[in-house]
Image (tube, rainbow, N blue to C red):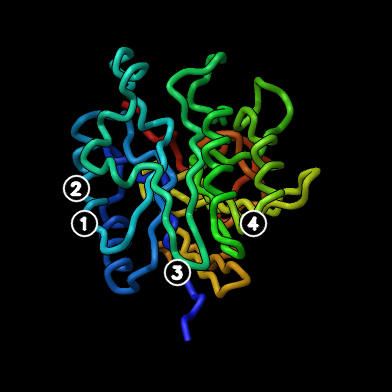
């Protein structure tokens, strides 16, 4: 009898250039020992998309002992070369090109990409997410082409929640994307960007969508230790365990809401995890 059990490791925001090598060595050992069915990396592989940062990311990712799919994060777009950013934004991924926005067929479960990082957008803060019509159409076409009964995990970089105004929105057109995903056989949306884990059921006019965020494996922690999500699928339900280096219980690692950005909390009442591991200074930006 073929089992429907699947194990997925969900990693995000590794930020080579400010990576946490102890965390990376630990995750690599966990992958080698547990042999997950897939590894989904939801963006921000690098700190500033430098060639040396991509070289380090490529070397590490290509040695993982599992099928891997990689999303593009806003930090992975060229920062210092505008011509390359506009005309060849994914050139630096060439060493792992086959893994970028790769759909994974796990039998009863599939991982389907939805790109939220864009080379430019009509607002000042390009670090925020944007779901283009073309990207959403590609994702929905892939979902609609799945065999009947196959559930999907949709991999994005930015959380899709839209909070209403362009000035404070996490992801432009995220609300539209969530409504479309709610109409399909989507078990959850996997994301990163905010550097803390979360597990939220988002209500839409078309039904609920589960949103699962992974923490960071870098030195740029927000309020919880470096972590990744170990996701188990039993054929009907998803179970998420937030794995971290300090043995903090999973509920204490998860935030109750999605912060607008990945900066450390500065004031009481900001949506942060109960662990409250707030850096004394902002993570350095070079």
Quadrant of the rendered structure where residue 141 is? top right
Residue 180: quarter of image = top right
Q: Do callouts 3 and 4 mark residues in contact (Cβ within 8 Å)?
A: no
Q: Mark 2 points at which residue?
A: 59
Q: Distance between the residues labelled 2 and 4?
A: 35 Å
Q: Tell me the distance, in whole angstroms, between the alpha carbons under discs 2 and 3.
A: 23 Å
Nearer the N terminus, badge 2 or badge 3? 3
Whole-percent x and y of residue 232? 51, 70
Give the SS element for disc 1: loop
Kindly report which numbered mark, 4 or 1, lies closer to the viewer in this rendering: 4
- Crowd band around label 1 with a 10 angstrom C-alpha radius: few (<14), some (14–19), many (20+): few
Q: Residue 63 carries which label?
A: 1
Q: Pointer 4: what residue?
A: 185
Q: Is 215 placed left or right of 149 in the picture?
A: left
Neighbour class for label 4 at 10 Å: few (<14), some, many (≥20)?
Answer: some
* Of pointers 1 and 3, the one earlier in the residue sequence: 3
For the point 51% across and 63% down, the residue is 109
Question: Mark 1 to mark 2: distance in Å?
Answer: 7 Å
Q: Is mark 3 on a helix, strand or loop?
A: strand
Q: Residues within 10 Å of mark 3 (few under 14, many from 20)?
A: some
Q: Which one is nearer the viewer's eye here, 157 or 142?
A: 142
**Residue at 80% from the left image edge and 43% from the top image edge:** 205
How far apart in space, not on screen, are marks 1 and 3 (Cα)?
Answer: 19 Å
Where's residue 191, x and y in %? Answer: 52, 46
Dot label at residue 7: 3
With 151 as the anchor, is 46 left or right in this view? left
Callouts 1 and 2 close, C-beta under 8 Å: yes
Q: Which residue is drawn at 43% across and 30% down?
A: 74
Q: Compared with residue 284, is residue 252 higher up or lower down, i.e. above or below?
A: below
């Amino acid at each position: 009898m073929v089992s429907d059990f699947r194990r997925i490791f969900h990693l995000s925001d590794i930020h080579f250039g400010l990576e946490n090598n102890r965390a990376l060595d630990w995750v690599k050992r966990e992958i080698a020992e547990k042999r997950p069915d897939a590894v989904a990396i939801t963006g921000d592989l690098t700190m500033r998309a430098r060639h040396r940062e991509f070289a380090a990311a490529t070397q590490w990712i290509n040695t993982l002992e599992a099928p891997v799919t990689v999303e593009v994060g806003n930090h992975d777009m060229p920062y210092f070369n505008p011509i390359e950013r506009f005309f060849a934004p994914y050139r630096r991924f060439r060493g792992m090109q086959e893994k970028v926005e790769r759909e994974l067929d796990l039998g009863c479960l599939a991982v389907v990409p939805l790109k939220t990082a864009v080379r430019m957008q009509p607002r000042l803060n390009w670090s925020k997410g944007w779901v283009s019509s073309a990207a959403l159409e590609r994702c929905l076409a892939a979902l609609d082409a799945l065999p009947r009964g196959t559930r999907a995990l949709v991999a994005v970089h930015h959380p899709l929640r839209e909070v209403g105004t362009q000035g404070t929105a996490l992801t432009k057109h995220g609300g539209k994307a969530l409504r479309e995903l709610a109409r399909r056989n989507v078990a959850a949306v996997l994301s990163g960007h905010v550097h803390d884990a979360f597990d939220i059921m988002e209500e839409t006019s078309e039904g609920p969508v589960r949103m699962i965020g992974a923490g960071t494996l870098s030195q740029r922690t927000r309020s919880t230790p470096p972590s990744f999500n170990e996701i188990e699928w039993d054929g009907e339900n998803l179970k998420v365990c937030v794995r971290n280096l300090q043995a903090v219980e999973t509920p204490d690692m998860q935030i109750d809401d999605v912060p607008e950005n990945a900066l450390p909390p500065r004031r009481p009442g900001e949506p942060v995890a109960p662990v409250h591991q707030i850096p004394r200074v902002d993570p350095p930006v070079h």
